[in-house]
Amino acid sequence: MPASSLNHKHLFYFWVVAREGSIAKASQVLHLTPQTISGQLSQFEDTIKVRLLQKHGRGLALTESGQLVLRYATDIFYLGEELQEALKDTRTGRRQRLVIGILDSIPKSIAYKILEPALKLGKDLTFNCIEGPLDKLVSQLAVNSLDVVIADAPISANYNIKTYSHLLGESSISFFASHYRAANYRKHFPQCLDGAPMLMPSDASSIGRAVKQWLRDNDLRPKIKGYFDDSALLKAFGKAGEGIFFMPSVIEKSVIQEYNVRAIGKVDELTERYYAITAHRRISHPAVAAIYETARESLFSAHD
């Protein structure tokens, strides 16, 4: 079916009916008679040649095709609302605002690198960065309190919230140690990890779980000295020589420079992935688009 044959007025009526749960309620919202709306929906179904709604008790239920159309319609009309807001901003000269949720287990250096392209868009953009656990961030995203969530895993179906996980890129994993510890471990990596003191991120970190599995698979049993929710605190302990730690290889140089440590090895088979989670399929906010495009094109294509 060509796009030109899709009647957006009919699509909008369907969207309101699906959202309100009945033609009677939709008629109050649209200020139209139920008969008018029913007739428009029938025309819409005839045009697209699929059944969208079926009777269910005293109300209506979406068919499988109806659920598909509803998902697309929601994106279309939310994007329309965002467009109107964006145009209003350009007319009034109002500063654009970007509210970002950042998973608390993501290293701060990675978060900055991911967000840096948005900083370069201009002085009329105001940031609000909110850090927290995934459950909290996804809940805020669902009610449009956040524009995007930066996470280390896609959102699972268990959340029962419509979100879209856009892969930004992936990085191999590098292991680090203080200078005096590195001298003992660099020559025989990764066998040197067996029995070595190690600092680990909390189990909330997807890469922490992956590294644990990799250690088991390779029969390596380091002595875990501590678990950390905060990656900056973990690196500070590593700098002080309390144990070996690991970070994404994409920030290897910055970790070495900032914490005065040495890289003792890299594991290419271990990868950390990063995602931009949005409430809509299409990325419409220009700052989020800049983040996504830069990450895909350059940030994760070559390590710094």
Image (cartoon, rainbow, N blue to C red):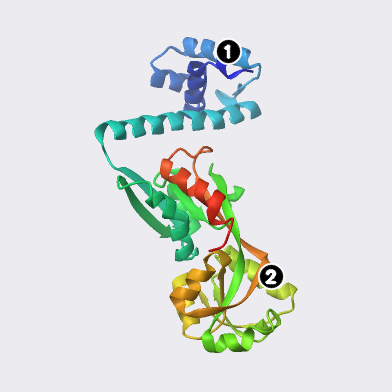
Which secondary structure, mark 1? helix
Q: Residue at x 53, y 43 (%)?
A: 163
Q: Residue at x 67, y 84 (%)?
A: 187
Q: Residue at x 49, y 54 (%)?
A: 150
Exactly how many numbered labels are in the figure? 2
Percent position of residue 168, x then y: 55, 51
Percent position of residue 15, x then y: 50, 25
Looking at the rendered structure, the kind of residue marked 2 is Gln
Query: Circle 1 sits on which residue?
Result: 42
Residue 8 versus residue 304 in the image, above or below: above
Which quadrant is home to the N terminus?
top right
Q: Residue at x 55, y 32 (%)?
A: 71
Please tell me the numbered disc located at residue 149: none
Looking at the rendered structure, the kind of residue marked 1 is Ser
Q: Is residue 22 visible?
A: no
Please tell me the numbered disc located at residue 213: 2
Q: Is residue 90 visible?
A: yes
